Image (cartoon, rainbow, N blue to C red):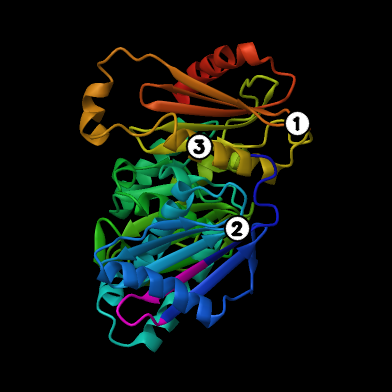
Amino acid sequence: MGEEGTGGAVHLLCLAASSGVPLFCRSSRGGAPARQQLPFSVIGSLNGVHMFGQNLQVQLSSARTEDTTVVWKSFHDSITLIVLSSEENASELKLERLLQMVFGAMVLLVGLEELTNIRNVERLKKELRASYRLIDSFLGDSELIGDLTQCVDCVIPPEGSLLQEALCGFAEATGTAFVSLVVSGRVAAATESWWRLGMPEAVLLPWLVGSLPPQAARDYPVYLPHGSPTVPHRLLTLMLLPGLELCLLCGPRPALSQLDPQVKPAVFRFPLNPSLLERWWQPLLEPLRACLSVGPGALPNGFPLHTDILGLLLLNLELKRCLFTVEPLRDKEPSLQQRQRLLRNFYSLVSTTHFPPEPGSSEKTEDAGHRIQLPRACYLVLGPGMGWQLVALQLGLRQLLLLLSPQSPTHGLRSLATHTLHALTPLL
């Protein structure tokens, strides 16, 4: 688990299950998009061996060679997705969840009907181009981790209660129950209805907003893979400040005639009925700027973290939300990208080995809070020449993963993690 994936490549293939016709191929190398395409003979062989197994009632889900991991997954007997990764320590969990997110992205932007009843392959290929930017963001290095954890990436704004109050008031004024504030793909505040969105749309919607180029206002048709896979909704995004967007998930209203993008003083944008936006958000300009400043740090500026912490991942498994940051002591080694990879790989390891979900755990969630909770912990000290340490702690419905500097004493890892988890618990 050293400098994982720095030169590895990931290839994603999408094919029509019945005909084997390739719909698209996306690639990345070293965490950046790549133009490299696999030869058609390789694509045909990978699909052929999967179909051969199906004909014999054998489900081929994954395979591993000396330097490559391959995962297959079929959706609705219509779409086959195949991913090949030559990144070091590429786990099957990571690749399986990647395929789930990719198919979710396809449904989000094209709709399930088009994917399950393919009438015109060439037209479907063109429609799927709209999902390329979102899909490519899953293949590359990202500051987000919701694609792997299946929890919504969040930030904790300094004046969250003020923003929450304004958000609920704005939602009521616009007649829209699903409203959120998104900072670079992370949710800073949201209405109760937004938080109740199912998976994967709860992760996909803010991730989509964060992946799109900056724009003062958008009116984006989206399907909800879990809640409404065949009937589209409208995703309205309104830029309050560069990098901070107000998102509304709605039906026919607000009407398009209400959209009138214009730039106001103080770098504040009012694309929707100016008086309505001014009423709710102009008085909160400073809290909004403070929220924007949190950004990749996820935690409020000045939050007391131990000086040995280089990165952390906190998950609330009940609320399906997470905090992920590698910003502490950013001037020290390892690099931010290395920290992201280390924590992502460590999460895959502990999720499959140490903290696997218990059978029927979703049914026991309600009762879990009433049982005595004993923390479970594990730690990993990286090999020669690095010395960075990783520790994971589970207490009830929360998990905490920490990346620590070499000087942190091994015998104190559990105590440090427990103290940090208790300090973070009120935030999430």
User: Earlier along the polypeptide chain: callout 3 or callout 1?
Assistant: 3
Q: Is disc 1 surrounded by few (<14), some (14 to 19) or many (20+) residues within 10 Å?
A: few
Query: Which mark, by number, is residue 384?
Result: 1
The answer to whether residue 177 is left or right of residue 331 is left
Check residue 24 for magenta coloring: no
Front-most of residues 196 and 405: 405
User: Earlier along the polypeptide chain: callout 2 or callout 1?
Assistant: 2
Image location of residue 32, percent across then percent down:
65, 61
Name which residue lies at 62% across and 39% down: 342
Name which residue lies at 38% across and 56% down: 248
Compared with residue 255, is residue 139 higher up or lower down, i.e. above or below? above
Q: Is disc 3 surrounded by few (<14), some (14 to 19) or many (20+) residues within 10 Å?
A: some
Image location of residue 101, percent across then percent down:
41, 57
Query: Which mark, by number, is residue 86?
Result: 2
Q: Quadrant of residue 122?
A: bottom left
Q: Which quadrant does the N terminus fall into? A: top right
Label 2 close to label 1 by CB (< 8 Å): no
Q: Which quadrant does the C terminus fall into? A: top left
Query: Which mark, by number, is residue 349?
Result: 3
Q: Amino acid at mark 3?
A: Leu
**Residue 222 seen anywhere in this rendered image of the structure:** no
User: Earlier along the polypeptide chain: callout 2 or callout 3?
Assistant: 2
Q: Amino acid at mark 1?
A: Pro
**Boundaries of the magenta span:** 12-21
Name which residue lies at 33% across and 72% down: 52
**Residue 326 seen anywhere in this rendered image of the structure:** yes
Q: Quadrant of residue 324?
A: top right
